[in-house]
Every structure is written in structure tokens, then in C-alpha cells.
Amino acid sequence: MDKPRMPVVSSNVANKIMRVRLLERRVAGFGGLRNWLFDCGLGWFVDILDSEKLGMYQLVSLTMNQLKEMVLVALGPQRKLIHAIDRLSRPPQFEMVS
């Protein structure tokens, strides 16, 4: 039996809403955003994200420039955070096979 497929979403807003819902569900599986960040080795971003009061929609929309304005850290950890958020909020059919 085939797995049900998610509909193709053409609207940018609808796409972000779908990604937010996926991120919320997957982060909940780790026991919340704080636990997920620590699990990824990005625990020191917890205080920064808390102070900025970012919600899941803002996390999914976060850009390198926005992150750079919030934090004075090396580029590597910023990229790791952006990549981790992207991987966790990406629908399964878009995941690359390595």
C-alpha cells in the first residue's frame, strides 16, 4: 500500500505553515525546542532564541543575516542551526538520499 502523499503547495505562506507544523511535531518528539537544541549540540542558542522570543514560524523563516544580527558567533554554528531547522522542518518527500 502506498504512503499518502502530501499535496504540492504552491503558496509560500502555506509552505511555511506546513514546515512550522512539521517542526512543532518533530521538536515535540525531543521533548521541546530546548532539548532538541541541546541534542544537536546547539544548546547555547537557547538563551539567544529565548531572548528574541522567536516562535516556530520565525525559526522556519530565519535567515543567516537575521541570525548574524542577533548573535556574535562564528559562522559555522549559525549555519549548523539554520541547516538543523531546515532538516527538521522539511517534508519527508523532499529529504535527500545519501
Image (tube, rainbow, N blue to C red):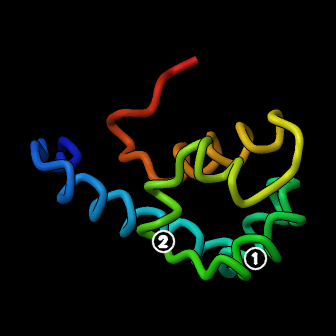
Left or right: 29 as drawn, with respect to 17: right
Please identify the quarter of the rendering in which residue 1 is found.
top left
Relative image position of residue 28 (x, y in whole percent)? 58, 77
Give above or below for 15 relative to 56: above
Q: Residue at x 39, y 43 (%)?
A: 92
Give above or below for 3 relative to 32: above
Residue at the spot of label 2: 56
Please identify the quarter of the rendering in which residue 36 is found.
bottom right
Give above or below for 9 relative to 96: below
Relative image position of residue 35 (x, y in whole percent)? 78, 74
Instruction: Please report whichever mark, 2 or 1, sits nearer to the chain's N-terminal start.
Output: 1
Left or right: 87 as drawn, with respect to 12: right
Q: Which mark is residue 34?
A: 1
Left or right: 76 as drawn, with respect to 11: right
Q: Residue at x 36, y 69 (%)?
A: 21
Give above or below for 94 relative to 14: above
Q: Residue at x 79, y 56 (%)?
A: 71
Q: CA distance from mark 2 to mark 1?
A: 12 Å
Point out the residue furthest to the top here. Answer: 98
Which residue is at the front of the view, 34 or 4?
Answer: 34
Relative image position of residue 78 (x, y in whole percent)? 75, 44
Relative image position of residue 23 (x, y in whole percent)? 48, 64
